[in-house]
Amino acid sequence: MAHVVLESCIRCRYTDCVDVCPVDCFREGPNMLVIDPDECIDCAVCIPECPVNAIVPEEDVPERQKQLLELNAELSKNWPAITKTGDPMPEAEMWKDATDKLQYLER
Amino acid sequence: MWRPPQKIKWKTKPGQWPGRDEASRSLLFSPLEVGPFRLATRSWVPAMVPWRATEEGFVTDDNCDWYGRFAAGRPGAIVLEATGIRDVPSGPLLRIGHDRFVPGLRRIVDAVKQASDGETKLYIQLIDFLSIRRRPEPAKFLGQHLRITDRHRAALEMNGTDEQEVRQALLELSQDRLAEVLDAREFEALRMGARERVTDTQLPHIRELPQVLPGLFADAARRAREAGFDGVELHYAHAYTMASFLSALNTRDDGYGGSREARVRLPIEVFHRVRAEVGTDYAVGCRFLSEDCIEGGSTVDDSTHYGVAFARAGMDFLSLSRGGKFEDAKQPAIGWSSYPYTGPSGYECMPAYVSDERGPFGRNFDPSARIRAAIRAAGLTTPVVVTGGVHGFAQAEDLLASDRADVVGFARASLADPDWFLKVRTGHGDTVNMCTYSNYCEALDEKHEEVTCQLWDRKQLDEPCVRMTKDGKRRLTPPRWVPPAD
């Protein structure tokens, strides 16, 4: 069990979640963050930090985003750790309410 | 951090909170006096390391604030974090291995007495631990630090080759091959960081532990008394030296290992020396494990034997924990040390809300009750402190009323809300900030970061004089609670 970053993060990547994580389990990709499920302790402290509500517990991942479970597990092994909150993506504001963003995921 | 595969999510159930009158009639908030062990209430804050000491082991203002804040909630007693008895560097952990540490420790005593109007007793946990190294860079370990032996040469079929060539060959091996070529301890040193054991009796300083430790503990206890502590708790629990003597894994052949009687010998000798140093009018107890929770480790039968032996020797209180061992700890990242709360035994010690069918609340109640019953059956009245996921009044009161505990410890529950005791006692239990057992605090501890609670560390940051963590993100103590006007 772990928490999962959903597609809302893509092209926004606000990173507010990173500073509050006590175990540094976020990993940074070109336009999205994911959570390493082996490191996450389910403390849930990151959930309210996300401006686009992209973080949910594993069991609350919506049906049509189930593949994010595997993507978080897979990409977290390739992407570097991020331990400090940084700047959002330049066009974050424009993309924050967009849906179906998985097509824009860069690896 | 290990979690049970069942992954059942548990929620705290504090149950009914008492009114002020009911609380005042309760066992939990009634005094307990057995010899020099005298508590105003039967509530207890067990030792927790908040990572606030200086690199040299001295007390800081943040240490004083921390313990003062707990004392403001008026628990019957607080046990100061594990404090090292040797005069050796050990990072930002408190130390008492020299008289120069006494004035700082006295400041904590003063802060606690002041914040509780002298009501809360303050004990200090005295610890000894053996050396543990950080997990090395493989290239550095194999290329420089590992002592090359003929065993390696033979395994590599490189007899007579010079050291540098052997190192080069080792650097090219897979993990599987390394596991064959290196001996078990060398391979462990590579994977986890080298860790000494009490059974390494080929090392003079390990062989001599039974001669050295009684004096070190006794000197530390003398300093504790000088600093004004109400008593000492000898740390015989978890992954550290004294618990390793008690463990069934202790096979020393010098009379201090093997049988139960031999394994408990040094802990008893340490106690006697401490007692001789501080006298009979000073509270001396210990914390030990009701179960090691590792393969081949001590069981509750062993611990029952120990509990009776400690009580018979004249300890003033016994506090029980469980698990928390190095033997099943997770592999640390390179540059980090192994941490004894990352494996299944660590889970037994600090179970989180993601749990199994048994859940995270009260896993140590039954074994503790067995140990206490054996002590009573031996005709001894030594108070027993029981901890582990206690968060509700009814749960604590039931432990006391059903003769399973004499004092109830609240660790994470008091970290989440140090005013738990005061609130419940004054009929304001409904305002308790309830621990969620997420183990956010434990995650910070594992990373050697200042420990705080997610329930309060970002609240009311605009209060005057709020002291913050080094990174400036989190407050170091919870906001003050002002009781509502009646």
Image (cartoon, helix red, strand yellow):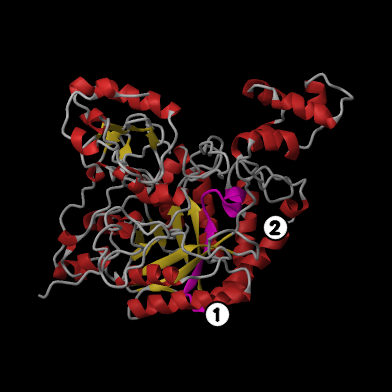
Q: Chain of mark 1?
A: B
Residue denoted by label 2: B210
Q: Chain of mark 2?
A: B
Coordinates of residue B107 in the picture (x, y in percent)? 46, 78
**Quarter placement of the C terminus of chain B:** bottom left
Q: Of the residues shown, which amino acid type is indicated by label 1?
A: Glu
Q: Residue at position x 64%, y 64% from top?
A: B86
Residue at the outermost right position: B160
From the viewer's perspective, is residue B209 above or below residue B301? below
Q: Secondary structure at mark 2?
A: helix
In the visual, does B60 lie left or right of B165? left
From the viewer's perspective, is residue B230 above or below residue B337? below
Residue at the outermost left position: B486
Q: Secondary structure at mark 1?
A: helix
Coordinates of residue B212 in the picture (x, y in percent)? 71, 62
User: In the image shown, does B139 or B130 lie closer to the viewer?
Assistant: B139
Residue denoted by label 1: B226
Q: Which residues are magenta?
A: B226-246
User: In the image shown, does B204 or B408 lie closer to the viewer?
Assistant: B204
Q: Residue at position x 54%, y 74% from top?
A: B224
Coordinates of residue A71 in the picture (x, y in percent)? 33, 23
Residue at the outermost front position: A90
Coordinates of residue B468 in the picture (x, y in percent)? 36, 63
